[in-house]
Image: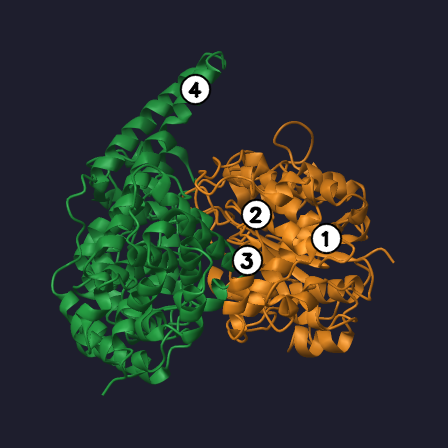
Amino acid sequence: MPRMPRREFLNLGALAAGGALLMPRLSFARAASGKSRLVVVILRGALDGLAAVPPYGDPDYARVRGDLALRAGDGPGAALALDGYFGLHPALHFLHDSFTARELIVFHAVASPYRERSHFDGQDLLENGTPRAHAVETGWLNRALRELPGPVEREAGVALGQNVPLIMRGPAAVTSWSPSKLAALDEDTLARITDLYATDPLLSVRLADALAADAIAAENTGDEAMMGKRALPANTQPAQPAPRQARYAEVVHAAAGFLRQENGPQVAVFDTTGWDTHANEGGGQGQLAGRLAELDAGLATLRQQLGPKWNDTAVLLITEFGRTAAINGTRGTDHGTATAAFLLGGAVAGGRVLSRWPGLAQRALYQGRDLAPTLDLRCVLKGLLADQLHVPSRALEKTVFPDSESARPLEGLLRG
Amino acid sequence: MLPPVTAAIAANRFGLGARPRDLSAIGGDGRDWLRAQLMTPPLLADTGLRSSADILAQGLSLQRKIQAARRNGAAANAADEPAVAAVLQKLPQYLRPIYVSEVTARFADAVATERPFTERLVHFWSNHFAVSVDKQYLAGLAGSLEREAIRPQVLGNFSDLLLAVETHPAMLLYLDNHQSVGPHSQLALRAQRRWGPRRIGINENLAREILELHTLGVGGGYTQGDVTTFAHVSTGWSIGGTGGRFAGGADGRFQFRTEVHEPGAKVVLGRRYPDSGFGQGVAVLRDLAHQRATAHFIATKLTRHFIADEPPAAAVERVAGVFMHTGGDLPSVYRELIDAREAWEQALAKYKTPVDYIISGYRGLGLPVDAGRAPLAPFELLGQRTWQPGSPAGWPDRGADWDGASALMKRIEWADAVGQRVGNRADALELAAQMLGANLTATTRSAIGHAATASQAVTLLLSAPEFMRR
């Protein structure tokens, strides 16, 4: 039996039994709304917003942060200046360049409606788009995709990873993709499995989605990262972990590969972890600095890989909540409330820090310990979805972010 | 009278997957087979694996050498940088083979065990009390946490299980408690006298996760104040030989440090605990173990694991009731699950996790668990590295978390690779009947029967909808 790479099988259109089921889903219809792209990066573990975006102009900042406070000015370890009051962590070079190039908006003292301190409920609420954890089993991004103008039957979103995170789960057709380290199946076996799944409503859809994602991925022939290590024989050991700076290289290459396609998905989502810095968080250098440097390098690669498409792209970085204003007993920070968020990209009307700064004086802290929230994250999300994906306002209020009347969409986040 | 699918559900949902002769051995009533497994603790057979204290003591000694080398390197003005870098590599190099041995032993046991229900319970509790090997030292200690704290207690009382886990060095390190210091402890006051006001205090990570993830569950009625006070209670729960102010005590063993324990009586969940040093934290844990919220939280998780993603409320209530009136006697709780009518009503109610999928494939096909790095590969490929859930919440336990398109394709590719490897030695049609029993559909039987090659037949068996679920 010939063992043919799956992409050739698909391109030849040599669909045996079951092919009729696959065909309609294989073409990602182009969004009627045009060429705009959105990448959502979830920072799981609660990013320390006061470390990522130090408010060194705040008279209480240095006292509250003690040894871990970042200072203004030049030289190694100093924060990168944004507007004289806020800086960026020194590991965030690319984000700083983007700010200077007016392609980055920093939001500070922002929080979702969640006011407890559980990562897992906090993430659930961040993704489900309602004011309550576990209120629904779909994500706001998926519900937004369902409202896009254009044909209904298409995969408008891709999750980079084996599975789809809650934010992207729901009624709209989406897929997931991750590089394969095993050999592709031959066409005959694949056709038989398609048949075997014909009466299974879940598996038939998942298999079709996987093939659709692979078909898009295959159009990026010559892009080694996109194709993963598909050529390796089955028993080859997975490679050693990539160098630290390259942690997100594979995932951003893949994301860019999808988003570059004119008929590809409009939205990509991926996860990052390692932000739960309870101990030995570090200041200008150290544990968090390393994580931020990896993220920054990944975003720089994303920009480079997107090429001209960058101009139509917005990248949103969000986390479930912030961390305590003060350092704890183990040179880290515990779970807090408000934090920072970022909107980056060629489509973004950047070069701004948007914040109604509550201050770090003891009386200003939320429950006497956390940065107080002054901006509802849903204001950012609603403004972004309205302007970048043209999600109708009525849908934003009704289905995408139910019970969010108090959170008015922020206008003018994108270049007009 | 239960339906005849009982053996298939017993072996595949409660167990880790049927081996070729399991279903006929189980016979008509899978409940007896499951109950009979609850007699003796599922300890690993003599594997030559080392104790956590031994593993950690050697690691701490290595770490002291690394720190000395770092200081010397800095003193020598970085002239010895390559040498320093080489020393820095030593800790991961030391821990990695321990991780590989632990994973291999666990995997081999899961594939070979005659008591797959208790082994699944070990996996369940290991995930309930999750640690993740992406944190320093856990690669060396995650396996010993399971062997030393979970396996001996999994058929005991929840309260003892809880105490064994929370005093294990792996958990104290993972949730940062070993260096948490009471702000009015002897050590803190001494430091303030000597150096003036300085940042010294608690770390609330362990206290929060005990309440949220190990006992009451989120929404279980505790406040931020309870978290902070409980963190004060648990100051002093530490590990010997962890350097600096924490150098005292036997290297790598649990050490209660009176000098960092926050003195005084404390109120947690409205109950006052007089200061009895180590005993104060033990008393809080004992009470947490017997709270109604804890019973409900544990019952919900067990019912979700063994019955359905959306656990039937009536079953949860019954299991929680048994938990409460037996004071957390785990075998009684398990027997209530076994007796739950809901467990037998719907076959294939759960989508397998990658670990379930891999282990059931190995068991069904009798695949050997080789030595070396090979045992790690399938878990990496299918996206569930052993003891690496990435967060203290552990791996999720709902189908939606595992049924992604790309994840499915990875399983099919793995099934294909296995088919290539064993196809010529396997009779897939016979195996399908023996592994899937009453769950085997005519569609799958026909597909396997009409396969073009023996390899393809195995691939179809491992890809079948009824093998993706349990």
- In the image, residue B131 sits, relative to residue A120, either above or below, namely above
Kindly identify which residue carries mark 1.
A259
Image coordinates of residue B447 in percent, x first then y, are 45, 67
Chain A colour in the picture: orange
Residue bearing the label numbered 3: A188
Report the disc number at residue A179.
2
Kind of residue indicated by mark 3: Asp
Which chain did the image draw in green? B
Label ID, residue B125? none
Above or below for A414 versus B14: above
CA separation, marks 4 and 3? 55 Å
Between the residue at mark 2 and the residue at mark 1, the CA separation in whole angstroms equals 16 Å
The subunit carrying tag 2 is A
Amino acid carrying mark 2 in the image: Pro
- Do discs 2 and 1 belong to a common subunit? yes
Circle 2 SS class: loop
**Same chain for the residues at labels 2 and 4, yes or no?**
no
- Residue B65 vs residue A392, the one in the foreground: A392
Q: Which residue is mark 4?
A: B84
The residue depicted at 31 percent of the width and 78 percent of the height is B343
Q: Nearer the viewer, residue B446 or A211?
A: B446
